[in-house]
Image (cartoon, rainbow, N blue to C red):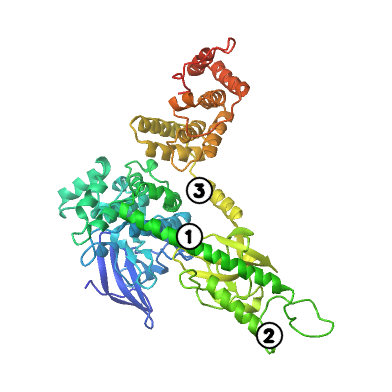
Amino acid sequence: MGKVFTITAGLENMGALKTGGQGSVYKGRRTGEIITAVKLLPTPIHSESPEDKHYAAFLSEVTKLKKVNEQPNPNVVRILSSGLTESGSFPYIEMEFVEGPDLEELLRPPHGPVFTVKEAVRLADQLSNALAHCHRVGVKHGDLKSNNVKYNVQTGNYVLLDFGLAIMSDEQRRTSLRHAGAIEFMAPEQNDGRILFPTDVYSFGVILFELLAGQVPFPLRDRGETMRTQVMLAHMETPPPDLMELRRAALPADWSEEKKQRELQVPQWLIDTVYICLQKDPERRFRDGVMLHDHIVLRSTHKAEDASTQPVPDIATARLQQENARLQEENSTLRQQLEQLQQFRRETADRRPFAEPVSPPPPPPPPVRRKGRTPWLSWIVVLGVLALVAWIVIGRPGISSGSGGDADTTTTTAATPIGQFMVKAARAYFYNEPDPGTRREAYMVPSTDVVTGLREEGGYIYTDFTNNRGQRSKGWLRRRDLMTLDEWNARQRQQQEEQKPKLTADEISNQLAQARRQLDDGQVEEALFIYRYLAEQEVPEALYEYGNLGLQKRAAGVDCGKSWGYVQKAADKGHIPAKRTLGFLYVFADNPEVLRINNYERCFYERNVYKGTQLLLEAVAAGDTTARRLVDELSLNSGGQPDPQNGPQ
């Protein structure tokens, strides 16, 4: 147990949990029985004057750190308090105590040496969500490693811990990093004491590599200074090893051959993500956790693409075909039953009893449950039949996984969606009816989950929502607690624009040159990453290259329409190669052989010889020799046939 001393009034020190180069973590107990974790930094601050640069830096970083918890995140530990200890004047951060193993422990017996692909993708999603949450408010973690990420046994979530390095001054950080024990997870720039947003992205890549391969890219074989130096240099100079080769060797011997084969089908996008994170140059990585998380969410939800990289064995295929045939037959039966139910409801809709039998009868009230009414016997029979049919159609085991919570009395059979929404309120409560008096305890919080509205009434939206864990909730949400998906996307784009660093002309030129070299070396994915990033900043050459690679089927996830749009935007900005390419495609749109030879057979194009000729002549006037050769081959004034090899490239 570490040295015991007073932390602060009302916070009892219960002994050390772990120690390291960036300080020690102690188990604390608040007045009562509230258990917390307290991070103590190793460098004391003896002056609490704003003139003291260490104290001023500490206050500045703590102020930023507080923003992390302004909006709770299930994947980020909750910061409870911070300050200086009563004895020793050590800076400290008090955090909630997360019960459960960390990733380092999950890779040791009795657990397996590697994660399954499914669990690795889940971890990647949740940990990148944690980084995105922190980076949005300007907080860089700086000490991301496998024992700083815990699996919360209470919630089932992975949680990012230990923000100790985030509140150090630059000078303290440089001193601490020289003695850090986690050099295996450190980005190259950390050797200079720098912590950037891409620094956390690099460490994220090391963690994901470790979970998939069973070891970090550059293991620390011993604690000697020589080995530390070798690992540090490897991070700076040596390419990471083959992840899949290491994974193949690390698969547990007690796994069946079928499971081993399945767990070797790692999606290519996941492998590419790891290697992009592990780029030596920070500018070649994802720029921050927000971009990283968006990338992972986008790629992990492309089921069809994933399936194309994971061939299904013949036996499994046969079983799937049998199951598919059975489900189709059952689906046909259910459709018939559903049509019968809908027809029955239509026939009886006009004969329903009024809520209050008075003369003359008033219009039927909204479908709100009333107490103290004596229903007619015949309607008991009708309702019983309806309940039976409804159970067959929507309550049959294996068809619906309703939560079984508060009943919903609104009929939504065959409802047509009225729109898609996102939660904007801190808590968007569910209601049984569009009535404030029917509020339930269940609620939604802001997230990336899309809510499909099925009906709107009286300022409320009805939805039947299932989250990514299969939990289902039906009911009404207040419209004012939601925003449309278009509004949410616009806000996200605005935030991303505000967060984008403005590149200088030299920086743009260097990145374009780097992307061209990567294309020449066959590193298409890396080049696409740069082009996509620069295209977002409206750089004409990047717009053209990204769109052109999409038209040539070399940019996964970019369809023909978007690819054409990128090239068109580049041409509108005066980019000559873009004009040349558009001109070529307009002229040869109906010549599949020419398109195939020049790798443009993926998409269909509009033939417009006049527009194509004008674009080619504009390129010629700007001195483009390739466009000149195309015009000469076309023999525009004599109707000659071109050489198909003289494409736009």
For mark 2, what is the residue? Answer: 378
Q: Amino acid at mark 1?
A: Gln
Query: 516 or 390, which is in the foreground?
Result: 390
- Looking at marks 2 and 1 on the same chain, the residue that comes earlier in the sequence is marked by 1
The answer to whether one can see residue 184 in this image is yes
Tell me how far mark 3 sits from mark 1, CA to CA: 48 Å
Query: 467 or 240, which is in the foreground?
Result: 467
Q: Amino acid at mark 3?
A: Gln
Considering only vertical position in the picture, is 443 above or below 233?
below
- Looking at marks 2 and 3 on the same chain, the residue that comes earlier in the sequence is marked by 2
Provide residue 465's location: percent of width, then percent of height. 54, 66
Provide residue 595's location: percent of width, then percent of height. 48, 26
Query: 553 or 544, which is in the foreground?
Result: 553
Residue at x-position 67% and y-position 83% = 379
Q: Which mark is residue 16?
A: none
User: Crowding at label 1, few (<14), some or many (≥20) Cα neighbours within 10 Å?
Assistant: few
Q: Secondary structure at mark 2?
A: helix
Residue lying farthest to the right in this orientation:
360
Q: Is residue 348 left or right of residue 315?
A: right
For mark 3, what is the residue? Answer: 499
Image quadrant where residue 439 sits = bottom right
Disc 2 vs disc 3: which is toward the camera?
A: 2
Q: Secondary structure at mark 1?
A: helix
Considering only vertical position in the picture, is 391 above or below 242?
below
Tell me how far mark 2 sits from mark 1, CA to CA: 37 Å
For mark 1, what is the residue? Answer: 328
- Looking at marks 3 and 1 on the same chain, the residue that comes earlier in the sequence is marked by 1
Q: Amino acid at mark 2?
A: Ser
